[in-house]
Amino acid sequence: MDLNVPKHIAIIMDGNGRWAQEKGKSRFYGHYAGAEVVEPITLKAKELGVSYLTLFAFSTENWKRPREEIDVLFKLFKEYLIRKEESILKNGIKMKFIGRKDRIPKDLLQYMEDIEQKTRKNSSIILTLAVDYGGLDDITRAFNKLLKEKNEVTQEDIKKALDTCFLPAVDLLIRTGNEKRISNFLLWDLAYAELFFCEKYWPDFTPEDLCMIVEDFSKRKRRFGAVQPVDMI
Ligand code: IPE
Ligand code: IPE
Ligand code: MG
């Protein structure tokens, strides 16, 4: 059977803290373990033929966490970009970032811009990390941009003003960590996404799990509000 591979997969990488705490370790340990899962999942997505993979790394609400955890996360993102740069380049991955740019540490921002620049011509898969991202915040910033130019807007105008302007609509949203909510991720772009909630915590998520979920997606019938000819009587 030919697999109907989603063009754009988005993942809410949730459960790092609980994964660690259940092992009697600190939440930080869970974040480090979670970061290690990003590369194998990206490579598997690329191998499957997925064109866009978008990962939720830090939400606009995650600022409510203790300062120490926030600092560990930003330090981890920076270290990760430095450590994985070679592999990202070798694998022809194009890296992009979405989210606010005015609150994250300047040194991290510099690494983000550097890697976007260095990988801009790559095309094997577009890997987008959402850092200080919130769907409501993205839509609000888009509206404020548009207010300066127009007094009436179309859906296309809104899409073009979003951080996600370069991304097609999400086909498949996966959330690990056994919670069934969107937590203010890509609101505009999830309009017709297929949803998959996985019980596993993110550090336990494997490339095989991704394949299994893509197979499940492949069997789903997407109607986009219409009636399929086969459904008509
Ligand atoms: C997801 O794991 C990573 C981030 C939000 C940065 P969590 O840190 O939310 O882990 P749980 O949900 O508390 O287990
Ligand atoms: C969503 O997870 C954000 C990321 C994975 C980066 P949260 O753990 O922050 O979401 P809630 O608080 O359970 O909704
Ligand atoms: Mg969580």
Image: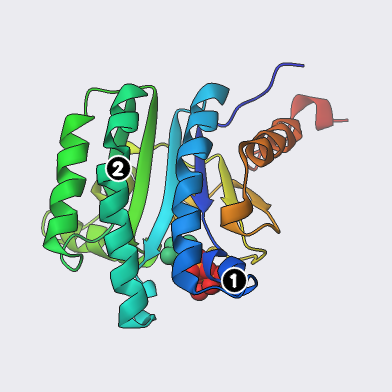
Q: Which residue is mark 1?
A: 18
Q: Does the numbered disc 2 mark a residue whose Cβ is under 8 Å from ligand 1?
A: no
Q: Is mark 1 within 8 Å of ligand 1?
A: yes
Report whether residue 158 is seen: no
The residue positioned farthest toward the right in the image shown: 233
Q: Amino acid at mark 1?
A: Arg
Q: Residue at x 19, y 69 (%)?
A: 103
Residue 198 picture quarter: bottom right
Identify the residue at the far front of this view: 24
The picture places residue 214, in percent across and down from the top left corner, at 66, 34
Identify the element where label 2 is drawn: helix
**3D distance between C-alphas at marks 2 and 1:** 25 Å
Residue kind at label 2, given as amino acid type: Arg
Q: Nearer the viewer, residue 17 or 187?
A: 17
Residue 135 placement (x, y as % from top left):
39, 61
Mark number, residue 27: none
Question: In this view of the protein, which residue sits in the foreground, 3 or 145?
Answer: 3
Q: Nearer the viewer, residue 46 or 50?
A: 46
Q: Determine which residue is flagged by label 2.
A: 83
Q: Is residue 42 left or right of residue 48?
A: left
Name the side, left or right, on which 139 lies relative to 146: right
- Label 2 vs 1, first from the N-terminus: 1
